[in-house]
Image (cartoon, rainbow, N blue to C red):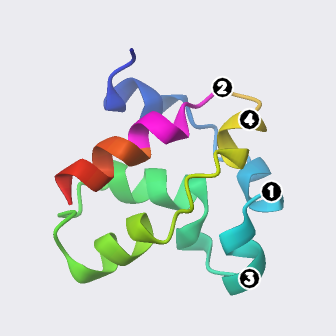
Amino acid sequence: MKSVTEILERCAKCGQCRSVCPVFAELKDEALVARGRLALMQEQIPLSSYRAQEIIGKCLMCLRCEVNCPSGVKTGQAFKSARAQA
């Protein structure tokens, strides 16, 4: 199992996750796609903040971003960790 840091560093910020994310399709908020959530985690914003909880909590955990990621980012593992911290 990879560390969250390794997962965050693997993201190339290509935006492929945007094209498959049902939350982004509905709300059109860049923070709500995988690369936005990963960036939030990289910035070390306290996951206890209301906005961070909103961003992490709106993920449906469908893992379409993970399945379609050309860099192989394990978003499910990272988001489960973020939810546990929040």
Specify few, some or many for label 2: CA neighbours under 10 Å numbering under 14, 14-19, or 20 or more. some
- The magenta region covers 72-78
Between the C-alphas of marks 4 and 1, the distance is 10 Å
Q: Would you name the residue on which mark 4 appears? A: 67
Any mark on residue 20, and which? 1
Q: Quadrant of residue 77?
A: top left
- Is tag 4's residue or tag 3's residue first in the polypeptide sequence? 3
Is 66 located above or below residue 13 in the figure? Answer: above
Q: Are marks 1 and 2 in contact (CB under 8 Å)?
A: no
Q: Would you name the residue on which mark 2 appears? A: 72
**Does the segment drawn in magenta span residue 12?**
no
Between the C-alphas of marks 1 and 3, the distance is 11 Å
Describe residue 21's horizontal placement relative to residue 63 as left or right: right
Name the spot of residue 50 as percent of width and height, x first.
25, 82
Between the C-alphas of marks 2 and 4, the distance is 8 Å
Is 5 located above or below residue 61 in the figure? Answer: above
Question: Residue placed at 50% from the left, 40% from the top?
Answer: 76
